[in-house]
Amino acid sequence: MNADLLSALQAQRIETPSWGYGNSGTRFKTFAAPGAARDIWEKLDDAAEVQRLTGIAPGVALHIPWDEVEDYAELKKYASERGLHIGAINPNVFQDEEYRLGSVTHPDEDVREQATAHLLDCVEIMRQTGSRDLSLWFADGTNYAGQDDLRARKRRMRAALKRVHGALPDGSRMLVEYKLFEPAFYATDLFDWGAAYSHCLAVGEKAQVLVDLGHHAQGVNIEQIVAFLLDEGRLGGFHFNARRYADDDLIVGTTNPFELFCIYAELVSGANSADDLTRRTAQNVAYMIDQSHNIEPKVEAMLQSVLNCQEAYAAALLVDRDLLREAQERGDVLAAHRVLTEAFKTDVRPLLRELRGELGLPLDPIRAHRESAYEEKVARERGTQTGGGGYPVREKVRS
Ligand code: AOS
Ligand code: ZN
Ligand code: ZN
Ligand code: ZN
């Protein structure tokens, strides 16, 4: 394999979310999966299994308070003993009673204060875990016209983001995630990339936009948003998933393989750009999975997700950039298009087997996982957690 390709593939990283390893459900039902992780320690064990089999997923995102522990230094140590590190910290400002009308945009100042205090606590957890990214998603919004003052809510959001930005340690960032709708159905305070981007510009350099693939209207060209934000130096990260309708958080690359490929193609192009800002931005993007596995076996679902990202990236690396540029400059519409689709249609699986061989990884991670009987082992040890409902099950801290 060519050395550049090998080193690019070897350097690829995909962060997995702690919440993807536990039981989760829809508002109708949570089906308990035998052996699903019951707390953050078991989630890290599962993440270690995904890392052992793929070699490109050492980061694990935490969700606070679902993953709250007494001693974060101990958690950090537990992770590093398993070849992992703590990734993005995701504060939860949507599950407390107080947040019925919003968190940082709530009309009552005390509630806004409570929410902002939680965000600041999470900055402290970043320090203790060595995490680089604070990943912010707000359920804030309204259900009816007139319910609240839209401009006032915008200003409240800005004020909270500004305070949190001011508390971020050097070298760290806040990633601002937008979402078209849900759980608010009339107006969402951070409703699209433009709203997130404006806040980021206003609050400072450490604020960047997070793109979750499930958070757009049908048919939106996500790779164009990616290209735009890369060029502006404000693309911070991704929440990878796939969807059919709303934010259904399915396995990335299942319904949207071409979209995923086009996104990676933009990122490869950005990482090779002559423009300093674009290049630096592309090189620091946080690649994270945000999925809730409702009926799938959790670890295998995560493995599949990581492998789908790996295949999309490998194909994107195969795009012949010189040929593409020449065709674009000639105005040769279809030749340019075919340069992309040639790469997309290439079967990269032999290449990835070669990579795994060189890295001493199982050549077929899914098969290795099934043969290892990991799923059976954790089912025996952990049992089947019953009860619980909604999204996701609130995990108890191990005593
Ligand atoms: C919610 O729709 C967002 O995608 C969040 O990023 C997410 O699902 C997770 O709960 C992190 O808070
Ligand atoms: Zn998300
Ligand atoms: Zn989402
Ligand atoms: Zn999600």
Image (cartoon, helix red, strand yellow):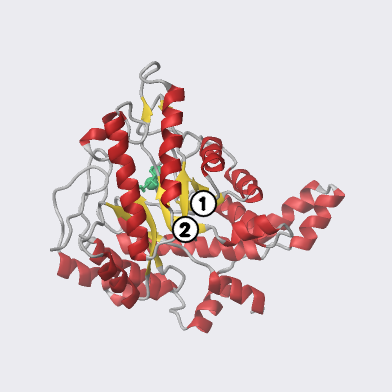
Residue 20 shows up from this direction: no
Count the labels in the image: 2
Element on which disc 2 rests: loop
* Quarter of image, res 106: top left
Q: Is residue 306 visible?
A: yes
Q: Position of residue 151 (x, y in %)?
A: 46, 24
Tell me the SS state at disc 1: loop
For the residue marked with disc 1, what is the amino acid? Answer: Lys
In the rendered structure, are the residues bearing label 2 and label 1 in contact, judged by CB atoms less than 8 Å apart? yes
From the viewer's perspective, is 53 left or right of 8? left
Q: Can you identify the residue that label 2 sits on?
A: 172
Q: Residues within 10 Å of mark 1 (few under 14, many from 20)?
A: many
Residue 285, placed above or below residue 51:
above
In the picture, the quarter occupied by the C terminus is: bottom left
Q: Is residue 243 above or below residue 22?
A: above
Image quarter of residue 154: top left
Q: Nearer the viewer, residue 107 or 373?
A: 107
Q: Is residue 257 above or below residue 28?
A: below
Q: State the image coordinates of residue 117 (x, y, percent, origin top left).
A: 30, 44
Query: Which residue is at the far top?
Result: 146
Task: Determine whether the beta carbon of the residue marked 2 sits less than 8 angstroms from the nearest atom of ligand 1.
Answer: no
Give the image location of residue 254, x and y in percent: 47, 53
Relative side of 328 to 161, left or right: right
The answer to whether residue 246 is left or right of residue 194 is left
Q: 103 above or below 298?
A: above
Label 1 belongs to which residue? 206
Nearest to the observer: residue 352 or residue 370: 352
User: Based on the displayed image, in which of its 4 quarters is residue 268 positioned?
Assistant: bottom right
**Place of residue 324 in the rendered image (x, y in percent of width and height, measured from the top left):** 77, 57
Q: Which amino acid does the dot numbered 2 rest on?
A: Ser
